Amino acid sequence: MSALFFETQNKNPHRNLALEQYIAEAYPGEAKLMLWQNIRTVVIGAGQNAWAECDTRLLMEEGGMLARRVTGGGAVYHDAGNLNFSFIMPPGVYDVERQLRVILAALRSLKLDARFTGRNDLTIEGRKFSGNAFRTGKDSCLHHGTVMVNLDVALAARYLTVDPEKHRARGVKSVPARVVNLSEIAPDVTVEAVWGAIKAAFADEYGLCDDTDQLPDVNPDTLDNPRVKQLTEKYASWDWVFGETPRFDARLKQWFDWGGVTLNVELSHGVVTRAVCYSDAMDETLPARIGEALAECPWRARALAERAQSLGGDYGRDIASWLASARL
């Protein structure tokens, strides 16, 4: 199995997300890593409400950009002090533990003792410097994440509108208290050093394809074809980034160990005619599945709980328990 490495100096988040998808489509059989950065950007998870996660007006007034990725999880802030990595793997090669080994080995080479903790975090000295998100598919799997080297934490707090109830529910400290830049731990560490270390660690773990002359369009910065343009337009579109924000008759909200759920419903004669869900759960399919499960359900706690159980697993159990006791 050959492995390919991609890097881009492009800083536009919509094009970078387009490149991520294009690479998955163009090179389905190879293990792939892309390193990239965005400038003054908030990236929200696939299942999140843009208006609730970010002060969009302030972000755009100050020259920032908003993007929505295809993976689940929560909103993050990117700038030039942050480095992003994307492992784009065939299903048979996709292995989160092995992929994280690349990142951790790279940081160890820089004398940084990082660890993987919780549902998707990389931490150092007990503080988070990286969030990861995942999506598995039939033809391609994606694992991407961030590395805070010297990110402007003040700007992140300025643009991200984190619900304080989220931290109370999970018993954690505020965001500034629990995140850290690698440069705070090791002042000499730079984005360039981390970039080079990750590239070297990927080559050590997977090897790199020597015959790149046989592969077209291997340089993301020179890609200029209809598919890349189409995907860039998709990721920049209002419908993708913001989606529909209609008015609803009822709204329920709850936090769980695995993430938060906000449920908005339209009602007619005591029946749910439409349910739209937002969530930062790692499973990007969960919001749509909740909406489908509750459609045409009587607006009664027991009936809603029974429908929620069909989701299965921890999600179904927790959401059913919540709805069974909801005050409707």
Image (tube, grey):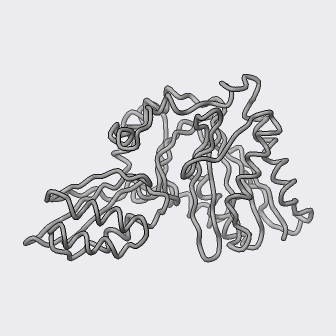
Measuring 77% from the left and 35% from the top, which residue is drawn there?
Answer: 192
Q: From the viewer's perspective, is 203 left or right of 274?
A: right
Give the left or right position of residue 129, taking residue 62 as reference. right
Give percent across and percent down for residue 8. 72, 48
Residue at the outermost left position:
269
Percent of width and height locating residue 279: 39, 56
Task: Name the image quarter holding the C terminus.
Answer: bottom left
The answer to whether residue 104 is above or below residue 156 is below
Q: Residue at x 79, y 39 (%)?
A: 108
Q: Which of 307 and 80 is in front in this view?
A: 307
Q: Which residue is pictured at 15% across the width and 74% down the height?
A: 298
Displayed quadrant of residue 295: bottom left
- Place of residue 242 in the rendered image (x, y in percent of width and height, measured from the top left): 38, 53
Q: Name which quarter of the figure residue 95 lies in.
A: bottom right
Q: Which residue is drawn at 19% across and 58% down?
A: 326
Q: Which residue is more in the foreground, 121 or 204? A: 121
Q: Quadrant of the N terminus?
A: bottom right
Horizontally, residue 204 falls left or right of residue 104, namely right
The number of numbered discs placed on residues in the rendered structure image is 0
Residue 279, above or below 77: below
Between 147 and 12, the one lying in front of the other is 147
